[in-house]
């Protein structure tokens, strides 16, 4: 070994990395790395002197007149000492000669590479290369060395955090599902309690209507048969406004009947929406599901949004009705929010808008066929539910965010209603959820459910 360090070699520098907590999105630039560059005309003994001084130094970046040419690790360099004539080469020959004997594939990554991705790429190397350090290129063009042990430890820590986050999310989801199940049972019980008195009103309306008509007939018969009506009777008729009462009684009973019928439909829709799905799907009338959701959100339409239904002939579709109702509610609520917000914006900037079109949601259902990928297989049949609005449409950035939220690998801490809908259609029903949007032309969602 040389007694003094070579003037050609600058001492290695270890960057401390980022002091913040590492997470799933952390990159290589946040890890401590060695900056140790050696001109390729130096000897192996000169470099070994630094390895002796810095026992944690994993290797050296080889440069020729400042230009990157490769990397030689501590292990590869010191292997020469046990080779025949290795000591002579080690002491006398420059690193360019030694490197020509030890040249191996180098894993070179930019410093923006996620730590978990770098870990996967490192593990894909051949077994004899697994212990080799990784060369990291910074944005400024500087090459540094990352000890693979540092990468392994950090990645395992991050994976532990990821597993903990997944566990906590699963626990939260279990609690949320349990709450929703209890809420569904509670709402179902309340709806049942409301339906009972509504049933009493509905059942007795017919009798009350018949009774009132019979009483009016009786009074008319008395008036006809009596030659002179007592003064007291005439006075009572005048006090109760009998002529108006006779005309308005049937209208009042009809209004009560309409209100009871509407309340019954509303409570039934609420029961269907809070339906607790069983283990297996059941056949469902999709048109009834859509009508129930429209009835529930009717108060939000405020008479400003027009609903157009283009219903086709649909067979009963096997599905989980409660979850499918949630998907329909999510998509329709999204469309209603968009149209109402656009209506407010148009009212505020009315002078800038030449023509104001009435907000509209168009719902189309039909059975379609799709060609099978295998030419020998029959065409697949699907039920299509298309929900389109004439709102302002979405920007490309927003569309990209929605698409990324659909990805299982990029689950956010708080999922959006559209991401939940996508998973319900895809995972629970084996279907498809597509959307198209263009600025100024509105947004269109398509739900495809397979027919079995």
Image: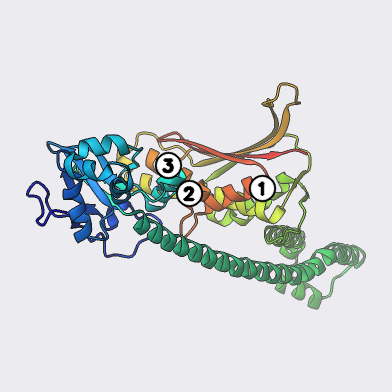
Q: Secondary structure at mark 2?
A: helix
Residue located 52% across and 40% down the image:
360
Residue located 36% across and 47% down the image:
345
Q: Are marks 2 and 1 in contact (CB under 8 Å)?
A: no
Is residue 152 among the parts visible in the rendering? yes
Is residue 301 among the parts visible in the rendering? no
Q: Which residue is mark 2?
A: 405
Residue 406 pos. (x, y %): 51, 47
Q: Earlier in the sequence, mark 3 or mark 2?
A: 3
Crowd rating for badge 1 (residues with CA inside 10 Å; few <14, some 14–19, many 20+): some
Task: Please tell me in which quadrant of the rendered image residue 382 appears.
Answer: top right
Does residue 17 lie above or below 200 as drawn?
Answer: above
The quadrant the C terminus occupies is: top right
Comparing 86 with 330, the one in front is: 86
How many marks the image carries: the answer is: 3
Task: Please tell me in which quadrant of the rendered image residue 201 appears.
Answer: bottom right
Horizontal arrangement in the rendering, residue 82 relative to residue 217 (left or right):
left
Q: Which residue is mark 3?
A: 400
Please name the colour scheme applied to the rendered image: rainbow
Of circles 1 and 3, the one toward us is 3
Q: Tell me the distance, in whole angstroms, between the alpha carbons under discs 3 and 2.
A: 9 Å
Q: Secondary structure at mark 3?
A: helix
Horizontal arrangement in the rendering, residue 430 relative to residue 414 (left or right):
right
């Amino acid at each position: 070994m040389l007694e003094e360090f070579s003037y050609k070699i600058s001492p290695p520098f270890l960057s401390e990395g980022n002091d913040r907590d590492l997470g799933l999105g952390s990159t290589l630039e946040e890890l401590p790395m060695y900056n140790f560059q050696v001109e390729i005309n130096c000897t192996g003994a000169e470099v070994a002197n630094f390895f002796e001084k810095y026992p944690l130094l994993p290797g050296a970046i080889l440069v020729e007149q400042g230009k990157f040419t490769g990397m030689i690790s501590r292990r590869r360099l010191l292997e020469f000492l046990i080779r025949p004539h290795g000591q002579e080469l080690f002491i006398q020959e420059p690193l360019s000669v030694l490197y020509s004997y030890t040249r191996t594939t180098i894993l070179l990554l930019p410093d923006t590479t996620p730590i978990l991705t770098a870990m996967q790429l490192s593990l894909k190397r051949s077994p004899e290369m697994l212990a080799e350090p990784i060369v990291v290129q910074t944005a400024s063009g500087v090459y540094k060395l990352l000890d693979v042990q540092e990468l392994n430890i950090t990645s395992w820590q991050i994976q532990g955090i990821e597993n903990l986050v997944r566990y906590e999310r699963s626990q939260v989801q279990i609690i949320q599902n349990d709450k929703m199940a209890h809420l569904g049972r509670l709402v179902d019980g309340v709806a049942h309690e409301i339906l009972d008195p509504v049933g009493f009103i509905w059942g007795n309306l017919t009798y009350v209507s018949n009774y009132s008509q019979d009483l009016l007939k009786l009074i008319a018969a008395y008036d006809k048969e009596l030659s002179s009506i007592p003064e007291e009777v005439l006075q009572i008729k005048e006090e109760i406004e009998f002529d108006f009462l006779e005309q308005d009684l049937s209208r009042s009973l009809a209004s009560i009947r309409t209100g009871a019928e509407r309340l019954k439909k509303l409570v039934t829709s609420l029961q269907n929406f809070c339906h607790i799905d069983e283990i297996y799907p059941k056949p469902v009338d999709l048109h009834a599901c859509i009508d129930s959701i429209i009835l529930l959100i009717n108060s939000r339409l405020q008479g400003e949004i027009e609903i157009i239904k283009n219903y086709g002939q649909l067979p009963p579709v096997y599905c989980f009705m409660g979850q499918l109702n949630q998907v329909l509610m999510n998509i329709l609520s999204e469309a209603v929010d968009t149209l109402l917000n656009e209506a407010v914006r148009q009212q505020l900037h009315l002078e800038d808008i030449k023509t104001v079109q009435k907000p509209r949601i168009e719902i189309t259902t039909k059975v379609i066929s799709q060609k099978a990928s295998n030419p020998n297989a029959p065409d697949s049949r699907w039920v299509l539910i298309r929900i389109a609005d004439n709102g302002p449409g979405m920007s490309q950035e927003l569309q990209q965010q929605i698409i990324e939220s659909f990805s299982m690998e990029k689950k956010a801490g708080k999922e959006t209603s559209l991401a939940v809908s996508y998973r319900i259609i895809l995972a629970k029903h084996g279907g498809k959820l597509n959307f198209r949007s263009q600025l100024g032309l509105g947004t269109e969602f398509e739900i495809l459910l397979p027919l079995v």
